[in-house]
Amino acid sequence: YNHALFSSIIDIAYALNNVVIKTTPGLAQAVAAGIDSLNDSDVLGCVAGDDAIILVSKSEEASARITEKIRKIAEN
């Protein structure tokens, strides 16, 4: 994955088994592809629009782990 790409994330939050990721306009699909490349077994799938991604995970606990993992990548 590309750290520069993940730096385009503006906000990330989760509720239950869904994670919503806001990106700069035009980069959501690229960030979703980056998330897919992490091969995280807790991620069931991502749907990306222009500036937002909905990620479905296996559980609320998985959503919390994924959110923290993506935050750490985006901060570096």
Image: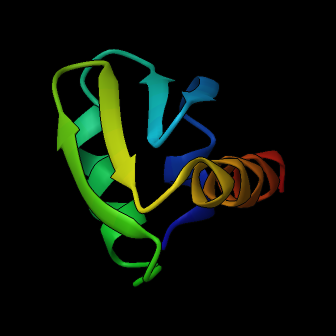
Which one is in front, 16 or 64?
16
Residue 21 versus residue 46 in the image, above or below: above
| Residue 40 horizontal/vertical position (percent) | 47, 79
Name which residue lies at 82% across and 46% down.
75
Which one is in front, 73 or 4?
73
Residue 31 seen from this side: no
Name which residue lies at 59% across and 30% down.
14
Q: How many marks?
A: 0
Name which residue lies at 71% across and 59% down.
65
| Residue 16 horizontal/vertical position (percent) | 53, 34
Q: How is the image coloured?
A: rainbow
Residue 15 versus residue 25 in the image, above or below: below
Q: Quadrant of residue 33?
A: bottom left
In this picture, residue 44 sits left or right of residue 67 = left
| Residue 76 horizontal/vertical position (percent) | 83, 57
| Residue 41 horizontal/vertical position (percent) | 43, 83
Name which residue lies at 33% across and 48% down.
56
Which one is in front, 10 or 19?
19
In this picture, residue 6 sits left or right of residue 65 = left
Which one is in front, 76 or 40?
40
Residue 20 versus residue 6 in the image, above or below: above
Residue 56 seen from this side: yes
In this picture, residue 49 sits left or right of residue 64 = left
